[in-house]
Amino acid sequence: MENCIFCRIIKGEIPAKKVFEDDLVVVIEDIAPVAPLHLLIIPRKHLVNALDLDPADDALIGHVYRTAARIARDKGVAENGFRIVSNNNAGAGQSVFHIHFHLLGGRQLGWPPG
Ligand code: 5GP
Ligand code: ZN
Protein backbone atom coordinates (compact mmCIF):
# COMPACT_ATOMS: atom_id res chain seq x y z
CA MET A 1 0.00 0.00 0.00
CA GLU A 2 1.55 3.24 -1.17
CA ASN A 3 0.88 5.48 1.77
CA CYS A 4 1.18 2.88 4.49
CA ILE A 5 4.06 3.69 6.83
CA PHE A 6 4.74 0.03 7.68
CA CYS A 7 4.70 -1.04 4.01
CA ARG A 8 7.23 1.72 3.41
CA ILE A 9 9.40 0.51 6.31
CA ILE A 10 9.20 -3.06 4.96
CA LYS A 11 10.30 -1.81 1.51
CA GLY A 12 13.19 0.12 3.09
CA GLU A 13 11.80 3.51 2.03
CA ILE A 14 11.63 4.68 5.66
CA PRO A 15 14.45 3.76 8.05
CA ALA A 16 13.77 1.62 11.09
CA LYS A 17 15.85 -0.39 13.53
CA LYS A 18 15.25 -3.94 12.33
CA VAL A 19 15.95 -6.70 14.80
CA PHE A 20 14.74 -9.63 12.67
CA GLU A 21 13.19 -10.38 9.31
CA ASP A 22 12.17 -13.39 7.31
CA ASP A 23 9.83 -14.10 4.42
CA LEU A 24 6.69 -13.45 6.51
CA VAL A 25 7.51 -10.77 9.07
CA VAL A 26 9.74 -7.80 9.84
CA VAL A 27 10.50 -6.97 13.49
CA ILE A 28 11.51 -3.41 14.37
CA GLU A 29 12.07 -1.32 17.47
CA ASP A 30 9.10 0.94 18.22
CA ILE A 31 9.96 4.60 17.63
CA ALA A 32 8.27 5.58 20.93
CA PRO A 33 8.95 2.70 23.31
CA VAL A 34 6.69 2.28 26.35
CA ALA A 35 8.79 -0.50 27.93
CA PRO A 36 12.51 -1.38 28.00
CA LEU A 37 11.73 -3.92 25.27
CA HIS A 38 9.16 -2.64 22.79
CA LEU A 39 9.27 -4.29 19.39
CA LEU A 40 6.74 -4.42 16.59
CA ILE A 41 6.21 -7.68 14.75
CA ILE A 42 4.87 -6.63 11.38
CA PRO A 43 3.61 -9.13 8.81
CA ARG A 44 4.89 -8.25 5.34
CA LYS A 45 1.37 -8.73 4.01
CA HIS A 46 -0.71 -5.56 4.23
CA LEU A 47 -3.69 -6.47 6.36
CA VAL A 48 -5.50 -3.71 8.27
CA ASN A 49 -6.01 -5.57 11.54
CA ALA A 50 -7.53 -8.79 12.90
CA LEU A 51 -10.80 -8.00 11.14
CA ASP A 52 -8.98 -8.45 7.84
CA LEU A 53 -7.75 -11.99 8.51
CA ASP A 54 -9.01 -15.00 6.60
CA PRO A 55 -8.22 -18.72 7.01
CA ALA A 56 -5.22 -18.46 4.67
CA ASP A 57 -3.57 -16.23 7.30
CA ASP A 58 -3.75 -18.76 10.13
CA ALA A 59 -0.16 -19.92 9.63
CA LEU A 60 1.04 -16.32 9.49
CA ILE A 61 -0.43 -15.52 12.89
CA GLY A 62 1.06 -18.66 14.40
CA HIS A 63 4.40 -17.59 12.97
CA VAL A 64 4.01 -14.13 14.51
CA TYR A 65 3.43 -15.62 17.97
CA ARG A 66 6.29 -18.09 17.74
CA THR A 67 8.61 -15.35 16.49
CA ALA A 68 7.57 -13.11 19.40
CA ALA A 69 8.19 -15.89 21.91
CA ARG A 70 11.62 -16.68 20.49
CA ILE A 71 12.65 -13.02 20.54
CA ALA A 72 11.31 -12.61 24.10
CA ARG A 73 13.52 -15.53 25.12
CA ASP A 74 16.53 -14.18 23.21
CA LYS A 75 16.11 -10.73 24.78
CA GLY A 76 15.89 -12.18 28.28
CA VAL A 77 12.35 -11.04 29.16
CA ALA A 78 10.55 -14.38 28.83
CA GLU A 79 10.92 -15.62 32.36
CA ASN A 80 9.77 -12.41 34.09
CA GLY A 81 6.89 -11.93 31.71
CA PHE A 82 6.11 -10.23 28.44
CA ARG A 83 3.09 -9.18 26.46
CA ILE A 84 2.06 -9.62 22.84
CA VAL A 85 -0.68 -7.11 22.07
CA SER A 86 -2.45 -5.88 18.97
CA ASN A 87 -4.79 -2.89 18.87
CA ASN A 88 -7.75 -3.17 16.52
CA ASN A 89 -9.30 0.10 15.29
CA ALA A 90 -9.03 3.58 16.73
CA GLY A 91 -11.11 2.99 19.86
CA ALA A 92 -8.57 0.41 20.99
CA GLY A 93 -5.61 2.66 20.19
CA GLN A 94 -4.67 1.48 16.69
CA SER A 95 -2.83 4.33 14.99
CA VAL A 96 -1.15 2.49 12.10
CA PHE A 97 -3.60 0.57 9.97
CA HIS A 98 -1.28 -2.24 8.91
CA ILE A 99 -1.59 -5.21 11.27
CA HIS A 100 1.19 -5.42 13.85
CA PHE A 101 1.88 -6.97 17.22
CA HIS A 102 3.60 -5.13 20.04
CA LEU A 103 6.10 -7.22 22.01
CA LEU A 104 6.51 -5.57 25.42
CA GLY A 105 8.75 -6.61 28.27
CA GLY A 106 11.53 -5.67 30.64
CA ARG A 107 9.31 -4.13 33.33
CA GLN A 108 6.26 -5.03 35.39
CA LEU A 109 3.26 -4.68 33.07
CA GLY A 110 0.00 -3.45 34.55
CA TRP A 111 -3.36 -5.07 34.04
CA PRO A 112 -5.91 -4.14 32.81
CA PRO A 113 -4.33 -2.01 30.10
CA GLY A 114 -5.75 1.50 29.69
P1 5GP B 1 -0.66 1.18 17.28
O1 5GP B 1 -0.86 2.55 17.90
O2 5GP B 1 -1.24 1.16 15.88
O3 5GP B 1 -1.09 0.03 18.12
O4 5GP B 1 0.91 0.99 17.14
C1 5GP B 1 1.66 1.71 16.23
C2 5GP B 1 3.04 1.82 16.80
O5 5GP B 1 3.91 2.19 15.74
C3 5GP B 1 3.18 2.89 17.89
O6 5GP B 1 3.65 2.29 19.08
C4 5GP B 1 4.19 3.88 17.30
O7 5GP B 1 5.09 4.39 18.26
C5 5GP B 1 4.89 3.06 16.24
N1 5GP B 1 5.35 3.82 15.09
C6 5GP B 1 4.63 4.75 14.39
N2 5GP B 1 5.37 5.22 13.38
C7 5GP B 1 6.57 4.58 13.45
C8 5GP B 1 7.77 4.67 12.66
O8 5GP B 1 7.89 5.43 11.70
N3 5GP B 1 8.80 3.86 13.04
C9 5GP B 1 8.72 3.01 14.10
N4 5GP B 1 9.80 2.26 14.37
N5 5GP B 1 7.60 2.90 14.86
C10 5GP B 1 6.55 3.69 14.53
ZN1 ZN C 1 0.89 -1.63 4.89
Image: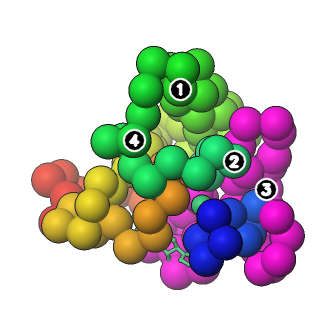
- Indicate the secondary structure of the residue bearing disc 4: helix
Residue at left 59%, top 28%? 60
State yes or no: discs 1 and 2 in contact (Cβ < 8 Å): no
3D distance between C-alphas at marks 1 and 2: 12 Å
Q: From this view, report whether residue 3 is shown above or below residue 58.
A: below
Q: Nearer the viewer, mark 3 or mark 4?
A: 4
Based on the picture, tell me whether residue 20 belongs to the magenta stretch. Answer: yes
Task: Looking at the picture, tell me which residue is in the foreground, 109 or 67.
Answer: 67
* Whether residue 74 can be seen here: yes
Residue at left 44%, top 64%? 97
3D distance between C-alphas at marks 1 and 4: 9 Å
Tag 4 or tag 2, which sits nearer the N-term? 2
Is 86 left, or right, of 77 in this rendering?
Answer: left
Disc 2 residue: CB within 8 Å of ligand 2:
no
| Residue 19, disc | 3
Q: Nearer the viewer, mark 2 or mark 3?
A: 2
- Indicate the secondary structure of the residue bearing disc 1: helix
| Residue 44, disc | 2
Q: What's the magenta region?
A: 11-40
Q: Amino acid at mark 4?
A: Asp
- Count neighbours of disc 2 (C-alpha within 10 A) and say few if under 14, some if 14 to 19, many if 20 or more: many
Label 4 sits on residue: 52
